[in-house]
Amino acid sequence: MKEPGKRIKESRLKQGWTQEDLAEHAKVNLRTIQRIENNETTPRRKTLDLLFDVLAIDRLEPEKTPLNKYMLWSSFLTLLIVAGTFLGWTRRFKMFVDGERTYQTFTGWTGYTFLNDYHFQNWLLSITSISVGLIVVANSLGLIKNKMKYILVQLACLILYLVGVLGWSTRQALELRPGLFLIVIASILLVVAYRRNGTKAGANQ
């Protein structure tokens, strides 16, 4: 798109007008017109409208950048995963004190679960889930190409963790895990969005 000053000058010359003629017809200060044509200033919208009307110049509206819904969606889900890591993941019966149950609460950065006799640390799952989100966001920004292999490995870690959690829940009276629920759902939606966006990109090419 041409600069407004250049468009005004070209149109004025085509009509055989001097800058003084244009100033008189448009009721705009001569010095203002000189500065606009020399690109020495950014003209106000009202001034441009006056000049464009007199010179019969079509107004070209600046192109609007379309809203990247995929970018917004993937960013939201990634933030949801990060938030989920700070919520309670597991609450289990720890012991009885004076005949009453006491509880221990883990988050995405503390505690662990069992997969048979192996301790699967919560922070490991948090890192893998967050990295899924970061890869998807980076892809939406055009910083990387297809990284589905890495995402599949991270999802495998998440599935192993869930297997351990479900196995442990039958023995340790596992209760609500809102943070873990958010992470699992957000990770799944991220991968779905990633695949759908990749399919659309391939179709466009």
Image (cartoon, rainbow, N blue to C red):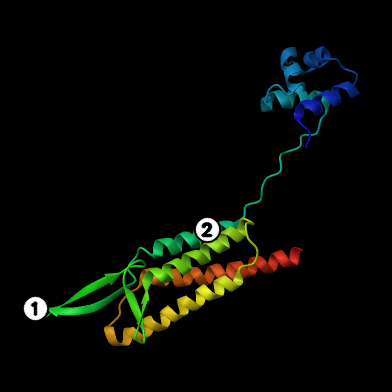
Q: Quadrant of the C terminus?
A: bottom right
**Residue 10 sits in quarter:** top right
* Residue, disc 2: 75
Q: Residue furthest left?
A: 98
- Provide the secondary structure element on which disc 2 rests: helix
Residue at 32% across, 87% down: 170
Q: Is residue 60 above or below residue 94?
A: above
Report the side of 85 relative to 149 (left or right).
left
Q: Amino acid at mark 2?
A: Ser
From the top left corner, tell me how far across and down residue 148 is, in percent.
Answer: 60, 71
Q: From the viewer's perspective, is 86 left or right of 77?
A: left
Image coordinates for residue 31, horizontal then vertical, percent: 73, 13
**Distance between the Cα atoms at labels 2 and 1?**
48 Å
Is residue 61 something that shows in the picture? Answer: yes
Q: Residue at x 42, y 67 (%)?
A: 126
Task: Determine which of the numbered discs, if any, sits on residue 98 in the image.
Answer: 1
Mark 1 residue type: Asp
Query: What SS does tag 1 mark?
Result: loop
**78 left or right of 19?**
left
Q: Earlier in the sequence, mark 2 or mark 1?
A: 2
Q: Is residue 29 visible?
A: no
Crowd class of label 2 (few under 14; some 14 to 19; many from 20; radius 10 Å): some
